[in-house]
Amino acid sequence: MKKRFILSFALLLALTLTACNNNDTDTKNNSQQEEGSSGAKSGEYAEIGSGANLVKFPEDLEKGIVFATYDRGDIHENIYVNSRKAIEAVQNGDELPSGTVITLEGFRDGEIEHYLVMEKRTGWGSQYSPEERNGEWEYQHFTPNREVAKDNIGRCFSCHANQERDDYMNSMDQMKEFDLREISQSKKSSSDTPLVAIPTEHWKVSEISDHVNDSKEVNKEASNVMDDEEKVKKIQDVLLKMYLQQYKS
Ligand code: HEC
């Protein structure tokens, strides 16, 4: 039992440390306005992807909800959405609301490779031709430093256009099936609740009382015997301290 507790504690520590490592400094991208090489095409419509500069790096990425992950060989991807409302909308059969930001955080061999962002806002995309636009979505590609990457954003539109019936999203099924109760106990994202991962059902509270009884025999004093209510309070206290500790660090 002791071993299990130590294991649980090590797990908690490991998770807390990973949480700390995520506090990368945000690099703001004020100056990187990338116009398409030639601006608008010769017709009446703007070049597809020329509005990519509207999409800024999502500052609060880590506060979002990871509703899907992909693993393919050495590639790992976390898909974030910036609001719970977006998930609730699709689960109620509604469209994704204006202001929805979906971010693909892509890793190769455990190293961050890129951030691909799609953002939907009322009125966006109206400058594009009806055949090329992806509803009201715009796309942007960011480097591991969270700066705008040089890329042809038009290709994002042409490939995601295949998903028109799912509001241009590939991971719509995962979003519809995501269990929001997974995050309801915590204000932060689901991966930040290490306490939930500790298997407390194997903790035997009775061991404490055995021990306390021993010491009572030695001391012939009943003063340090805890009743059940006290024990529960103590345990809750320790759990609370462990829980608060992770937010401090
Ligand atoms: C060749 C097709 C293709 C191209 C080009 C492409 N994507 Fe995707 N995208 C996908 C697929 C497929 C997924 C689902 C995740 C996966 O399979 O890895 C995806 C997932 C995403 C997601 C997560 C939401 C979703 O649709 O599931 C975002 C955000 C995203 N892509 C943004 C971009 C951006 C930005 C670009 C351009 C720089 C881009 N994509 C280019 C095919 C493409």
Image: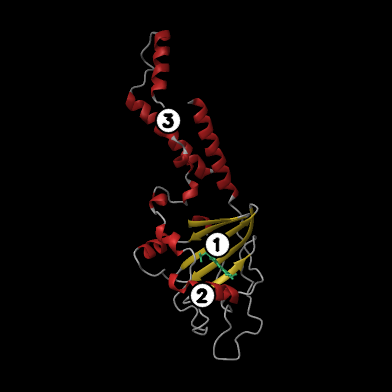
Which comes before the other along the chain, label 3 or label 1? 1
Give the image location of residue 109, x and y in percent.
Answer: 65, 53
Which comes before the other along the chain, label 3 or label 2? 2
The residue positioned 56% from the left and 85% from the top of the image is: 46
Res 104 label: 1
- Comparing 163 with 17, the one in front is 163
Give the image location of residue 94, x and y in percent.
Answer: 36, 68
Q: Are marks 3 and 1 in contact (CB under 8 Å)?
A: no
SS class of the residue under badge 1?
strand
The residue positioned 38% from the left and 51% from the top of the image is: 181
- Of labels 3 and 2, the one closer to you: 2
Amino acid type at circle 1 is: Leu
- Above/below status of 126 relative to 189: below
Give the image location of residue 245, x and y in percent.
Answer: 50, 40
Res 202 label: 3
The residue positioned 38% from the left and 19% from the top of the image is: 209
Q: Residues within 10 Å of mark 3 (few under 14, many from 20)?
A: few
Q: CA distance from mark 1 to mark 2?
A: 17 Å
Q: Looking at mark 1, is its residue's CB closer than 8 Å to ligand 1? A: yes
- Above/below status of 64 relative to 170: above
User: If the picture is divided into quarters, which one holds ligand 1?
Assistant: bottom right
Give the image location of residue 120, x and y in percent.
Answer: 47, 71
The residue positioned 52% from the left and 59% from the top of the image is: 79
Res 183 label: none
SS class of the residue under badge 2?
helix
Which residue is most to the front? 73
Which comes before the other along the chain, label 1 or label 2? 1
- Above/below status of 241 relative to 163: above
- Comparing 68 with 88, the one in front is 68
Q: Are marks 1 and 2 in contact (CB under 8 Å)?
A: no
